[in-house]
Image (cartoon, rainbow, N blue to C red):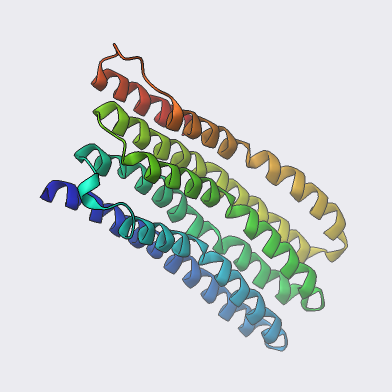
């Protein structure tokens, strides 16, 4: 009884806590850069503040996602309807949301930092820089959407988990999408930062950078799609009846780990 409650509430605490930590770090980075940029270009204060505030609002996505999932876990299925394996399966939700949310919460600050610096160099081009920043930041958040979808499926299926292989299968699904989000999120943020810095150097490159950014970020996103597809397959695959539960569970975990 106490073991299951420990797993359940630890999952909730991790989902909220880990994402909140990363968001706090990201917003701190964005705020510090905004202050630095204002000191360099006081006349552009209004534009820099607007970029920083909107950017921090998007950084909050990871924390909001964690809060949403925690509410779903708290207000979900009645405890008496769940087995020990059901609670164990919820670890997959923690992997999906925490791994993706922790990284995205931090790297989402990079485009905001780049935008603040770009406005100090191109104060009369701030509107275009803002649009570019919002677009790239929105793309950085997309792995979180995949993680949320997988987490919701895990929550739905966890109540029917009756064996260790069922639990491992759901954990592997969360592990796949969680790990698979890390690299693309960092890559998207690095590219966004470089592109926005380019706008700060030369505003005449906007149209060329815009089209190239859409193509490049779509390519960078592909590992997330692969991880998401494998996660969905793991959610709905059924091991053969004669298969050893523990062996099947290890196989599922290996698949999720390798793909992620």
Q: Residue furthest left?
A: 2
Front residue (pair 145, 222)? 145
Point 75% across, 73% down: residue: 121
Front residue (pair 3, 22)? 3
Q: Position of residue 164 (x, y in %)?
A: 24, 29
Q: Is residue 50 left or right of residue 67?
A: right
Q: Residue furthest bottom?
A: 43
Q: Position of residue 92 (x, y in %)?
A: 35, 42
Q: Is residue 58 above or below residue 93?
A: below
Q: Is residue 73 above or below residue 241?
A: below
Q: Is residue 200 left or right of residue 222?
A: right
Q: Is residue 117 left or right of residue 161?
A: right
Front residue (pair 257, 165)? 165
Q: Does any portion of residue 193 appear in the rendered image?
A: no
Q: Is residue 106 left or right of residue 12?
A: right
Q: Position of residue 145 (x, y in %)?
A: 54, 50
Number of marks present in the image shown: 0
Q: Is residue 52 above or below residue 241?
A: below
Residue 23 occupies quadrant: bottom left
Q: Residue furthest top?
A: 242
Point 31% across, 14% down: residue: 241
Point 57% across, 32% down: residue: 226
Point 57% across, 81% down: residue: 35
Q: Does any portion of residue 45 appear in the rendered image?
A: yes
Residue 138 occupies quadrant: bottom right
Front residue (pair 31, 127)? 127
């Amino acid at each position: 009884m106490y073991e299951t409650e420990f797993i359940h509430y630890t999952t909730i605490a991790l989902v909220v806590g880990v994402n909140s930590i990363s968001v706090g770090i990201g917003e701190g980075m964005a705020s510090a850069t905004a202050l630095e940029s204002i000191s360099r270009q006081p006349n552009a204060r209004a534009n820099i503040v607007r970029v920083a505030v909107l950017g921090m609002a998007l950084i909050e996505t990871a924390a909001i996602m964690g809060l949403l999932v925690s509410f779903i876990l708290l207000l979900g299925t009645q405890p008496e309807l769940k087995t020990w394996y059901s609670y164990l399966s919820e670890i997959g939700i923690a992997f999906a949301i925490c791994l993706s949310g922790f990284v995205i919460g931090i790297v989402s600050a990079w485009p905001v930092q780049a935008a603040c610096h770009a406005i100090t160099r191109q104060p009369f081009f701030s509107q275009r820089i803002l649009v570019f920043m919002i677009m790239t930041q929105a793309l950085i958040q997309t792995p979180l959407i995949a993680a949320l979808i997988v987490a919701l499926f895990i929550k739905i299926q966890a109540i029917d988990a009756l064996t260790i292989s069922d639990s491992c299968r759901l954990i592997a699904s969360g592990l796949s999408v969680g790990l698979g989000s890390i690299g693309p999120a960092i890559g998207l943020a690095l590219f966004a930062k470089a592109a926005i810095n380019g706008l700060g150097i030369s505003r005449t490159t906007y149209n060329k950078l815009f089209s190239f950014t859409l193509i490049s970020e779509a390519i960078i996103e592909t590992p997330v799609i692969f991880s998401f597809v494998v996660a969905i397959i793991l959610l709905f695959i059924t091991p053969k009846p004669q298969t050893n539960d523990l062996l099947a569970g290890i196989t599922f975990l290996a698949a999720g780990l390798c793909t992620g």
